[in-house]
Amino acid sequence: MAGEYRLLLENARQLVLVCGRGEKYLLRAGMASLAVLQNASLVVGQDGYIKAVGQADVIRNQFSGATFERKIDCTGKCILPGLVDAHTHPVWAGDRVHEFAMKLAGASYMEIHQAGGGIHFTVEHTRKATEEELFNTFKHRLERMRRAGSTLVECKSGYGLNLETELKMLRVIERAKQSMDIGISSTYCGAHSVPKGKTATEAADDIIHNHLPKLKELKLSGEIHVNNIDVFCEKGVFDLDSTRRILQAGKDTGLQINFHGDELHPMKSAELGAELGAQAISHLEEVSDEGIAAIARAKCAAVLLPTTAYMLRLKQPQAGKMLNEGVIVALGSDFNPNAYCFSMPMVMHLACVNMKMSMNEALAAATINAAYALGKSDTHGSIEIGKQGDLVIINSSRCEPIGLGKLH
Ligand SMILES: N=CN[C@@H](CCC(=O)O)C(=O)O
Ligand SMILES: [Zn+2]
């Protein structure tokens, strides 16, 4: 039945706003005391945006004559903002279980990559897959992410490397953007690896002179709308100079810079990101002290990926030091054929145990700060009037169980 408003969530024991004063991100002090209401209700309008949040009795009086398409009794339950996954590689074909066995036997990520496996293996299979096959597996993965509480997900291309397959992946992402009930921030990651037979400089030239102009053309014709540009800045992949050229060209095309840096070797990626005005840099296991200071000053988010450090037995990113130095810390699942995790609650759990973040810090990093990393904290990442009504209701009177990796 049609109503004046789309949704009323009533009488929640706890409603975790995360923040309530229009903050774009939270630093360590703000993460320590998240905004929380007890015995609260909220209203979502027909346009999908939050219209009112407050004490249950106040909302009841304010909306006494209103009609709602749906009402949910949240007595004894806890409401949270939808989780934001700030880093995923969810469009690909072919699995890499055989490489897991190689890693368990002692091979490193880069040894497998240099021997033609890793990203190259996935590229081979993704090039051969049809658009329909890629869409069907991607859709299933997004559904699983949503079931685990994610309502906004960053999705990268990057298993094509040539223009044809990169565009195939971006069309698949665009189709999900238009047809699925989950928010997507799309990332062109054509510089995820140097294609076989090319040098990093040749690959960078191809991206700058062929890929990026095509993306601009497709944006103007309304066919594909990409939000971010990414490069894997790593020893043996894209060096600092090629990374700089690609990211600057992407920025000139109107894309937000959001790239992989300082993961396996110190590359001065963080320093470069700060210089170029990057919105976010992911990984940062090997970031320098100067890099930490630079991204703190530049308000460039650090997207930390606990599944990668766990899976590849890397040193943990220095979350505590970054938080102490004023860095905006966000989290992502890094879902990819090498790190098969759909669940942000599990990521938050790993961030608490292995990176020593508090449960509040992990929640802020998986909501408002992850939204900031995608340039979307004006509309996502907290429960505030005017923001998108992306919500998670958990069958618990408080939000802490999510820090155990649990989504009831
Ligand atoms: N490090 C580069 N890219 C991915 C891994 C992609 C893959 O191995 O397929 C990451 O973020 O972990
Ligand atoms: Zn990645």
Image (cartoon, helix red, strand yellow):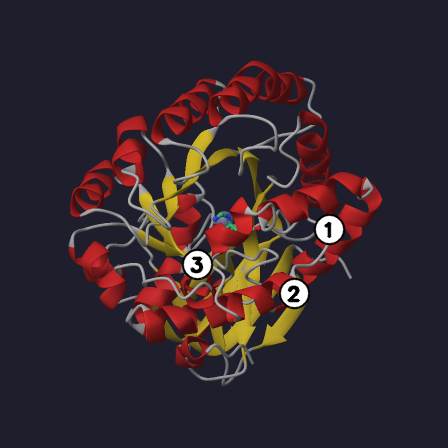
Give the amino acid type for the residue marked by disc 2 in the picture. Answer: Val
Q: Is residue 280 above or below residue 381?
A: above
Q: Quadrant of residue 266?
A: top left
Instruction: Tell which of 149 and 317 is nearer to you.
Output: 317
Q: Earlier in the sequence, mark 2 or mark 3?
A: 2
> Looking at the image, which residue is at 73% across and 51% down?
93
Mark-to-mark CA distance, 1 and 3: 36 Å
Classify the position of the N terminus by image quarter: bottom right
Closest to the observer: 158 or 407?
A: 158
Q: Earlier in the sequence, mark 1 or mark 3?
A: 1
Tell which tag, 1 or 2, sits nearer the viewer.
2
* Contact? badges 1 and 2 (CB < 8 Å): no
Read off the residue under disc 2.
97
Discs 1/3, front:
1
Q: Residue at x 60, y 61 (%)?
A: 99
Instruction: State left or right for residue 24 relative to residue 322.
Output: right
> From the viewer's perspective, is residue 96 above or below residue 195?
below
